[in-house]
Amino acid sequence: MLLIACPYCGPRPELEFAYAGEAHIARPIDPMALSDEEWARFLYIRSNPRGRHAERWRHLNGCGRFFNACRDTVTDKIETTYPIGEAALNAQSKVSR
Ligand SMILES: [Zn+2]
């Protein structure tokens, strides 16, 4: 069974966690100033990279807290986890294949 290291609880079985989308998506400061297209892009368009990816996860059946993880989408290996609010840890750089 795959273990995921919750930054608050330590390593736990993957069944305790839920994926919650791409990390580091900043909400626009003034949403009313956006066009419909810009708003739709904020809501629905994500990077979906091949390689390292910063993701938000939730320890749903544990402490319940959200955190970020850097996962390689090719190998499905989670390289690191870190609390919400910390920098992206170069997660956006892609693995070249
Ligand atoms: Zn936890």
Image (cartoon, rainbow, N blue to C red):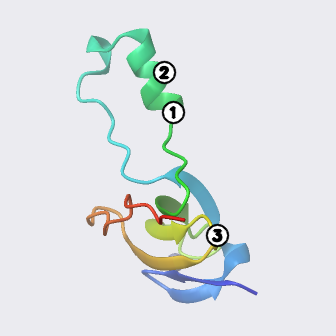
**Secondary structure beneath label 3:** loop
Percent across and percent down for residue 4 are 58, 81
The answer to whether the residue labelled 1 contacts the one labelled 3, judged by CB atoms less than 8 Å apart, is no
Q: How far apart are marks 1 and 3 (CA)?
A: 23 Å
Percent across and percent down for residue 50 are 56, 57
Q: How crowded is mark 2: few (under 14 residues within 10 Å), some or many (20 or more)?
A: few
Closer-to-camera residue (90/95): 95
Q: Is residue 87 left or right of residue 35?
A: left
> On the image, numbered disc 1 is attached to which residue?
45
In the picture, which quadrant includes the N terminus?
Answer: bottom right
Three-letter code for the amino acid on which mark 2 is drawn:
Ala
Q: In this view, does 5 lie to the left or right of 86?
A: right
Q: Earlier in the sequence, mark 1 or mark 3?
A: 3
> Between tags 1 and 3, which lies in front?
1
Three-letter code for the amino acid on which mark 3 is drawn:
Phe
> On the image, numbered disc 2 is attached to which residue?
40
Three-letter code for the amino acid on which mark 1 is drawn:
Ile
In the picture, which quadrant includes the C terminus?
Answer: bottom right
Closer-to-camera residue (5/92): 92
**Secondary structure beneath label 1:** loop
Closer-to-camera residue (12/39): 39
Q: Residues within 10 Å of mark 1 (few under 14, many from 20)?
A: few
Q: Which of marks 2 and 3 is nearer the N terminus?
A: 3
Q: In which quarter of the image is residue 82?
A: bottom left
Q: Which of marks 1 and 2 is nearer the N terminus?
A: 2
Q: Which residue is drawn at 38% across and 44% down?
A: 25
Q: Residue at x 57, y 54 (%)?
A: 20
> On the image, numbered disc 3 is attached to which residue?
17
The answer to whether the residue labelled 2 contacts the one labelled 3, judged by CB atoms less than 8 Å apart, is no
The answer to whether the residue labelled 1 contacts the one labelled 2, judged by CB atoms less than 8 Å apart, is yes
Q: Residue at x 28, y 61 (%)?
A: 85
